[in-house]
Amino acid sequence: TSELGAFAESRARFISAEASTGVTFDDFAGHEYVKRELKEVVKLLKKTDEFEGLDVYCPKGILLFGPPGTGKTLLAKAIAGEAGVPFFAINGSEFVEMFSGVAAARVMDLWARARQAAPCIIFIDEIDAIAAARGGPDVGGGGAEREAGLMQILTELDGFKVSTEQILLVGATNRKDLLDPALMRKGRIDKIINIGLPTEEGRLAILKVHARNKAFKSEEEKEKLLEEVVEETENASGAELANILNEAGLLCVRRDKTYIEREDLQEAMKRQEGEFETGLEDIVEYPPEVRIQAAYREAAVAILECYYPNPHRPFVKTDILDIESNINMEYTETRHNIFSRKSDYVSSIVRACAPRIIEEQIFGVDHLSWLSGAALTEAGIYAEKLMLQTSMTALGKIYYGTNADVMVHLRRKIQALRDEYVRFGVEKCTSVLREYRSAVENIADILLEKNEIMADEIWDIFRKAPRIPQPPVVA
Ligand code: ADP
């Protein structure tokens, strides 16, 4: 080819053209109000009879702004797909190239092609690369080049006659602040749409779109698992959510399964955050008796959490992968500020005793682990906090501060009362764990099999458990 031919070709290469994108508004989830707004633009672009004789025209330009991966490109394609018009796309940074004088020529080229295909959409991604404010900081050089490109865009926008050549320019950026205000004047890009990170509802909707063609055990299971992903993906973009489902699908295939399960999604989320796990076989193998003991400790704490729910921190799940730490339950913080009552302090004393009590009940005093001791120390600390810092006990309506040892004259009284609380904690905890023995065993078995168990399953077991009646414990 001649030099000129090669040049023309290189110009054309930057534009990607699709006669039909095949994307619809159903593919773009969340941001319902945006879709509602754009449905009207679609109608105008299609020139439906509805507007016949009325002096209304499709806007010339729309700006979509928001962080990367929020679906701006997808949405632009959906507008084209819904209207059934061709889609021309180009990246703003590609306008500005090594040859000077090319940017303006590329803009002209683009519009020339679009005009022949009108009605159609021109999509410029990273529009800030070319339409940055004139006279602003010259990031990356090419200031004059860019300016020529921008001037040409303005000329094209002002030049065409709305009624005959329907071309909709859709620009996307995550730096709206950089854009030249001239571009956003009325009659140019006069619709600005903010596409932020999806809300909780939005995340679920996006996950559902991307789970459409994926296999789950059942519809209910799918719903439940997706809701769990929503809980754990605050601040994720649509692209990240799509990626999680894609990755989970791949893991599922690699594990030779026919449908996606929780473990696939959990691992996909970890990968999304850059944590890689080579698979369960790589987890440190603890001796079986150590795992069993850990499973029972977790199970006992889980039952106590159900018996005395902590209003500040409902739990999410528990696991036995980290056997050396005391308790592996995960908690979600509640948003409201709930005041603790005296009974809440007392329940925390009872709960704290659980690892010790269960080890004694199941494995016997000779097999108590170091963590058992830690449990009762914790119970004692809670008791002291209650006595010294809340003025709610027999120690008096006084705030004593944080250090019980300083109060020499009170030491005996404090110790006696603390022991009394811990004794009550031990007895109450013993009674609860005897009463719910079968539930504890049930949960421990699941932990031993799967390493983890979610809060709803624990609650279910707790509610349905056959209970063994116990004599009342007196405080
Ligand atoms: P942007 O242009 O904002 O950087 P993209 O449109 O390229 O984002 O998004 C990348 C991919 O992420 C999309 O192709 C789609 O698979 C997924 N995605 C992002 N946002 C959404 C959304 N709101 N609904 C459905 N999928 C989405």
Image: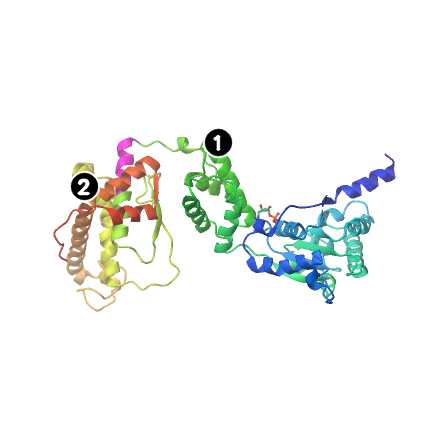
**Magenta span of residues:** 287-297
Residue 179 visible somewhere in the drawing: no
Name the quadrant of the C terminus.
bottom left
Write the residue at 72% across / 44% down: 16
Above or below, 392 relative to 287: below
Left-right relation of 137 to 418: right
* Residue 170: in magenta span: no
Residue 254: give its label. 1
Q: Nearer the viewer, residue 188 or 20?
A: 20
**Residue 78 percent location from the top left of the image:** 63, 51
Q: Position of residue 231 (x, y in %)?
A: 44, 51
Main SS category, magenta section: helix
Vertical position of residue 450 compared to residue 161: above or below: above
Corner quadrant of residue 187? bottom right
Is the residue under label 1 in contact with that under label 2 (CB below 8 Å)?
A: no
Neighbour class for label 2 at 10 Å: few (<14), some, many (≥20)? some
- Nearer to me, 281 or 461: 461
Q: Amino acid at mark 1?
A: Arg
Residue at the spot of label 2: 360
- Residue count near mark 1 (Cα–Cα under 10 Å), binned few <14, some 14–19, many ≥20: few
Separation of residues labelled 2 and 1 (CA atoms): 43 Å
Q: Quadrant of the N terminus?
A: top right
Q: Earlier in the sequence, mark 2 or mark 1?
A: 1
Relative to 294, is 174 above or below?
Answer: below
Find out whether residue 290 is within the magenta segment.
yes
Residue at the farthest front position: 49
Q: Mark 1 and ligand 1: say if the CB distance to the nearest ligand atom is below 8 Å.
A: no
- The verdict on label 2 being within 8 Å of ligand 1 is no
